[in-house]
Amino acid sequence: MVVELLIDKLVQGGDGLATHEGMKVFVPYSAPQERVRAHIVTQKRDYAVAEIQEILEPSPLRISAPCPYYGACGGCQLQHINYQGQLVVKRLYLNEALQRIGQIFVPVRHVTAEATPWHYRNKTQYPVGATGDGMAIGFYKRGTHDLLDVPACLLHPVEFDRLREAMRAVFAATGETGYDEARHDGNIRHIVLRQGTEDGGLLAIVVTRTPEFSTRAAELIAEQPGVVGVAQSMVPSRTNRIMGSRTRVLAGRGYLHQSVLDKTFRVSAPSFFQVNVEQAEELCRKVLKHVAPKGDELVLDLYSGVGMISLIVAPFVQHVTAIEFDATAVEDAMVNAQAQGVRNIEFVCGDVSRAISQVASIDVVILDPPRKGCPAETLRRIAALKPKRIIYVSCNPATLARDLATLEQLGYTTYEIEPVDMFPQTFHIEVIARLGPLGSADE
Ligand SMILES: C[S@@+](CC[C@H](N)C(=O)[O-])C[C@H]1O[C@@H](n2cnc3c(N)ncnc32)[C@H](O)[C@@H]1O
């Protein structure tokens, strides 16, 4: 069925939302306030999905997407919207998610923009697949596990494109095979590339199904321009997980260095680090502003990774306790603290939900959980510590809204919501929320 639709707004995932005869219709790659003729491709009881056939009246935000793979590749959702427009639609969506999911009615501040919203990523994960005549290395098509071989991406450094092509040639020359997901056969499942800010050094991580990987292939990859290290991670089972639990270094070194606000962080191959360093600096500035340190605070940094936030905050407060469950990241954090001469941080390696029970007295809690957010029981333990401030850093507005609602039930109020555009061209957004005890004069 073909229908004419007026797109009202963008919703979770970046699809446009229109209404047709009382039914919600989701329209991928549409923009707010445009009229489209669209073909209904999925019809459910309470919603439909439609594909644009013709744009009848374009949105004032619409531009032509620069990437030739846009639409086919599932990596970006907003390239057809100008950059200022992207900031507006993300802010509106964040505001709506907070209100609808969490009943949080705090005005969302303007999104802090990225100065150069292209080539900002310092890490990219490419799925690798088997094809009849070789291997595909690229990205999944939208909503599928079908691989699209994308030779150049506008979100990561051009060095990644060159290295990935060189790796493809190395794999072919050394007889390495791409992973066949349907048959659970073939070896190379993913390539993960990372680049450091310090020396632009490249780290290549090959994720394999079996423990085997050609020594010669590792040597040849290590010889490529800019490569400082080659590592292998193994994922033997049928799973969507990208990295395995152990990473072994095959050549060179297994880490690189990222610089944030003039501090240098060692980041090992499997350790988490923000993918956009320029915006990570914005994030850290805002977190520090919300900590509003006077010098005597006891701070708890939950989900602390390689210690980026802890080490930015530590010089301004009395003490930081940092909790992280990835042992490699904790090791990086300890190396980073030593290199920076910081002594007032205690690094705890453990699951936040358990390790938090050892914390006694605290003034400020900073938490930066993964996309799924924070377990309610952990939020209860945080509230029971009665911190004067809670600073919640989130990359998922939906779970942030849910968790803020829980904290509000536990006696806290959300005072400020500040988004940072960590992921231009995509619908993702990073958010910093500041809470204080209900009724505190902390507005
Ligand atoms: C979004 S990252 C934030 C890292 C750090 N705050 C930063 O900005 O670099 C989340 C971190 O939480 C860790 N993590 C996830 N679940 C955890 C848990 N249950 N307990 C402890 N750490 C966890 C991950 O390993 C990751 O390093």
Image: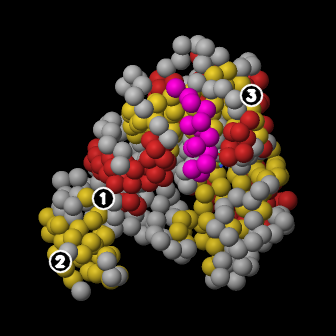
The residue at label 1 has a CB less than 8 Å from ligand 1: no
Tell which residue pokes out farthest to the bottom in this image: 1
Residue on which disc 2 sits? 21
Q: Is residue 357 above or below residue 213?
A: above
* Mark 3 → mark 1, Cα distance in angstroms: 43 Å
User: Mark 3 or 1 closer to N-term?
Assistant: 1
Describe residue 163's horizontal placement relative to residue 398 as left or right: right
Q: Which amino acid type corresponds to the residue marked 3 in the rendered image? A: Glu
Residue furthest to the top in view is 295
Between label 2 and label 1, give the one nearer the viewer: 2
Query: For numbered disc 1, what is the local secondary structure?
Result: strand
Q: Cβ–Cβ below 8 Å for labels 2 and 1?
A: no
Q: Which residues are magenta?
A: 375-388
Residue 376 is inside the magenta segment = yes
For marks 3 and 2 on the same chain, the one whose residue lies earlier in the sequence: 2
- Look at label 1 and name its amino acid: Leu
Instruction: Residue 291: give x, y in percent of width and height.
Output: 51, 24
Q: Quadrant of residue 100?
A: bottom left
Residue depicted at 39% across the width and 28% down the height: 439
How many other residues sit within 10 Å of disc 2, few (<14), some (14-19) or many (≥20)?
Answer: few
Q: Quadrant of ligand 1?
A: top right
Q: Which mark is residue 173?
A: none
Q: Amino acid at mark 2?
A: Glu
Question: Residue at the left extreme?
Answer: 57
Q: Secondary structure at mark 3?
A: strand
Q: Residue tagged by mark 1?
A: 10
Mark seen at residue 346? 3
User: Which coloring applies here?
Assistant: secondary structure
Residue 275 is situated, as x and y percent measured from the top left of the image, at: 55, 44
Residue shown at 60% from the left, 71% from the top: 136
Q: Nearer the viewer, residue 416 or 157?
A: 416
Compute the Cα span from label 2 to label 1: 19 Å
